[in-house]
Image (tube, rainbow, N blue to C red):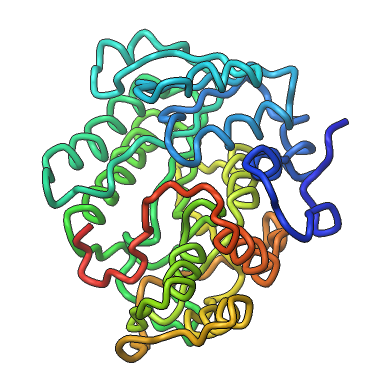
Amino acid sequence: MSERLTFDTVPDLIETEEQLEELVSRPTQGLVDDFATLDGDIIVLGVAGKVGPSLARMAKRAAPEKRVIGVARFSEAGSKEELEGFGIETIRCDLLDADAVAQLPKVKNVVYMAGKKFGTNDDPSFAWAMNTMVPATVASHFRDSRIVAFSTLCVYPFGVFAHNGWDERVQPRPVGDYANSCVGRERAFEYGSHVHGTPGRLARLNYAIDLRYGVLHDIASWVHRGEPIPIRTGHASVIWQGDSNAQILRCLKHCTVPTTPINIGGPEQASVRAIAHAFGEKFGKAPIFEGEEEPTGWANSTFQAQRLFGYPNVPLARMIDWVAHWVEKGGAIYGKPTRYEVRDGLF
């Protein structure tokens, strides 16, 4: 039996990418228990992004007897072979090609991760196609499956951080092409669920933390380089990527008809200023701030997820330790800032 992700099993520090990849794909006991009673195999659409490989690997580790199929264009050399090395079947497919989607195996459990965010303003039509047309095609083809689809906190209007943000009853009021197209993605899956009775969940993900990217990496890098930290967005909900992977996969056992949203993130609205000072102590550098905190921003409540899945296994302080060590030693990075500080919806 492989090790489970728990507070007691996580290391004090992470030294290598191999150790990081193992940890971020380590299943929780709750996921293993849920998958033991989950019928059918699993297909992950859009598996080749930052999060997809670890999520697919976690699914396979949680239920080695199930087929886990990863679908993507696999434009990056070696990504397909790496997944296959973990026992994950792979299929090359351009999800914008409806005829190609029609050839995909009709697996019982679908995790939908495909989408377009950065560069939306350069070509909004492509973002709208990826975030609305593809979901409509997928919802039709997999009408007899369960579908858990990734969404984003950006579909909400700004909420008050001191009030813990919005819960899932609040209707979207998006700003900008990206957020509007993400509401379109949700509506496409909602329509398919209404028409075909497809069980599903819309996972409105906050900020998942890997050591190579994420809100904590952004803040740590600014402090380490002595660069000003934009502070208008003064809080963010962050969660270890392994915890968010496990919760999103567990949503397959908590689907609804029609599909409904669920917020996935940390239990608190974490203070950017406090996080920066924590990194400053680690690096021996005083953080520099730019601007003043606003009382509002993209904030939502994760109470529903906490009731279903409990608290995340990796607390904020441990993530700060990991990221500080990783940044200070010059660990590998993706070079993709989260841009959590953006407030006008222009990504």
Identify the residue shown where x is 48% and y is 79%.
Answer: 272
Q: Quadrant of residue 86?
A: top right
Q: Is residue 46 above or below residue 123?
A: above
Between residue 51 and residue 17, name the one nearer to us.
Answer: 17
Q: Is residue 12 above or below residue 157?
A: above
Quick check: 229 left or right of 40?
left
Identify the residue shown where x is 32% and y is 60%.
Answer: 155
Quadrant for the N terminus, please.
top right
Percent of width and height locating residue 114: 36, 35
Quick check: 122 left or right of 242?
left
| Residue located farthest toward the bottom when viewing the structure as drawn | 292
Quadrant for the C terminus, please.
bottom left
Percent of width and height locating residue 255: 56, 41
Identify the residue shown where x is 47% and y is 11%.
Answer: 105
Between residue 107 and residue 1, name the one nearer to us.
Answer: 1
Percent of width and height locating residue 288: 40, 86
| Residue located farthest toward the top when viewing the structure as drawn | 103
Q: Is residue 323 above or below residue 6?
A: below
Identify the residue shown where x is 18% and y is 60%.
Answer: 176
Percent of width and height locating residue 249: 60, 39
Quick check: 333 left or right of 179?
right
Quick check: 337 left or right of 164?
left
Number of marks? 0
Between residue 263 and residue 214, name the one nearer to us.
Answer: 214
Q: Is residue 232 above or below residue 321?
A: below
